[in-house]
Amino acid sequence: NAGVMQNPRHLVRRRGQEARLRCSPMKGHSHVYWYRQLPEEGLKFMVYLQKENIIDESGMPKERFSAEFPKEGPSILRIQQVVRGDSAAYFCASSPGPQYEQYFGPGTRLTVT
Amino acid sequence: AQTVTQSQPEMSVQEAETVTLSCTYDTSESDYYLFWYKQPPSRQMILVIRQEAYKQQNATENRFSVNFQKAAKSFSLKISDSQLGDAAMYFCASARPNRDDKIIFGKGTRLHILP
């Protein structure tokens, strides 16, 4: 049973470009969570999605960031017009439902130059 | 609001010795979970141990155990017989399973193992 997969593992973007981060949850998991880890910090919650629904986006910046989890395919975290401050590791976690353990992917390290 | 505080940015321990990492938290919930995660240089987040607040017994996983003091809102991690592979960042975290399920992390403690 493959774990949570994230790609790419490393992404370099110039300021102003768009970044798309993908997360494929574990088989049978319909709940996805995105977290951001700034250098030397703990992970911070961004958004919680269920298939085709955003359940909680209270940690998501109001502008430039969006997330989706379509009926088919991976969850996507999209960052438009990236800035240097967006440089971080972005982690995705999945679970079969609320109150179950969240399993983390290996993360995508985004570097904005 | 939930908060998790780790007051030790770095710690060192001699190989084979025991070390305790501290964590305090704040929550108004009666039902919550507490966790310790390990993040080695690979950056993969690994769940070390989990404690349900309603359970009085402290959770243990092999060489890892917690001291859960509910009234004091303290949740420390003890690592016995430290091994070189234990070197990593350790994050204390909490979640409210009946509210929003998001995990709140502390800032972490970097643990060094001295050979």
Image (cartoon, coloured by chain):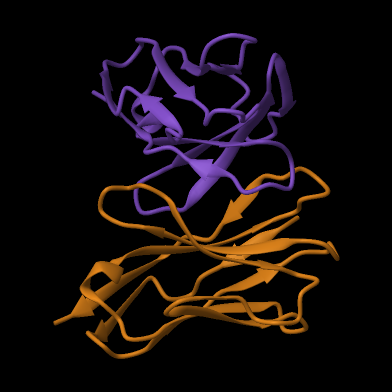
Chain colours: A purple, B orange
- Taking A47 as reference, is A25 left or right? left
Question: Quick one: B74 or B84, which is closer to the camera?
Answer: B84
Question: Quick one: A108 or A62, which is closer to the camera?
Answer: A108
Marker count (numbered): 0
Relative height, residue A98 to residue B88 (above, below): above
Q: Residue furthest left?
A: B115
Q: Residue visible at 70% across and 34% down?
A: A58
Q: Position of residue A101 (x, y in %)?
A: 62, 49
Q: Position of residue A92 (x, y in %)?
A: 49, 34
Question: Quick one: A62 or A100, which is closer to the camera?
Answer: A100
Q: Quadrant of residue B21?
A: bottom left
Relative height, residue B96 to residue B87 (above, below): above
- Taking B89 as reference, is A73 left or right? right
Q: Position of residue B44 (x, y in %)?
A: 36, 47
Q: The C terminus of chain B appears in which quarter of the rendering?
A: bottom left
Relative height, residue A64 to residue B56 (above, below): above
Q: Position of residue B114 (x, y in %)?
A: 18, 81
Q: Residue visible at 30% across and 28% down?
A: A9
Q: Residue visible at 63% across and 23% down?
A: A62
Relative height, residue A74 to residue A101 (above, below): above
